[in-house]
Image (cartoon, rainbow, N blue to C red):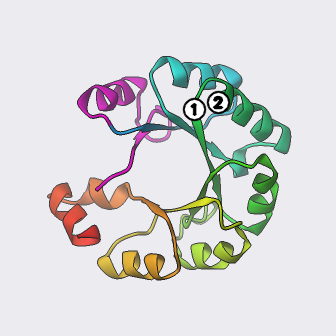
Amino acid sequence: GASCLSVLTDRDFFQGHETYLQQARAACSLPVIRKDFIVDPYQVLEARAINADCILLIAACLSDQQMSDLAAAAVELGMDVLIEVHDRHELERSLPLNQTLVGINNRNLHTFDVSLDTTFELLPHIPEQRIVVTESGILSRDDVEQMRAHAVDAFLVGETFMRAEQPGQKLKELFF
């Protein structure tokens, strides 16, 4: 089953809202990730205030200093940090932060093309003690099996479930 929920709170680009995270928190006991473009320490405080257990930091949107400061603020408030990377350069920038969770987004932010090869290319460069989360492009059981064969630890699946007529059935199809 699911080990956590990722909830969009960004309003402008993804029609998310903070109340969605609060509703998810009230509906289940799973940890909840605030998925947003977090660029300011206030957003980290806000994440804690709305009961997020984890924040997403997107390396492509942040300087090294911002990543460091935001990650430190989250840890100080008792939250985990999922650092999202898209390429080797972003991965190299994120590793010194020593965050346990490393998300590899398979979607190219410039073209929006999706390739699972992104995960396969970055995996060998991630220390073994990190938890690797593959993000975007998980469409089929075959995709899941390929990732598991490469020792990927976790999957962030959003769009596939949102587009499915029966999300619960899609979950079973992918993972069980």
To which quarter of the image does residue 87 belong? Answer: bottom right
Q: Is residue 6 magenta?
A: yes
Determine whether label 2 and label 1 are within 8 Å by CB.
yes
Q: Secondary structure at mark 1?
A: loop
Locate the C terminus by quadrant.
bottom left
Residue pushed farthest front?
Answer: 129
Choose between 50 and 111: the one closer to the eye: 50
- Check the image and report above or below for 161 versus 88: above
Horizontal and vertical percent position of residue 82: 59, 47
- Residue depicted at 24% across the width and 62% down the height: 171
Q: Is residue 133 left or right of residue 155?
A: right
Q: CA distance from mark 2 to mark 1?
A: 5 Å
Q: Disc 2 marks which residue?
A: 74
Residue pushed farthest right?
Answer: 65
What residue span does the magenta drawing correspond to?
1-29
Locate the N terminus by quadrant.
bottom left
To which quarter of the image does residue 56 belong? Answer: top right
How many marks overall? 2
Choose between 171 and 139: the one closer to the eye: 171
Q: Disc 1 marks which residue?
A: 79
Q: The residue under label 2 is which amino acid type?
A: Ala
To which quarter of the image does residue 91 belong? Answer: bottom right
- Check the image and report above or below for 16 versus 162: above
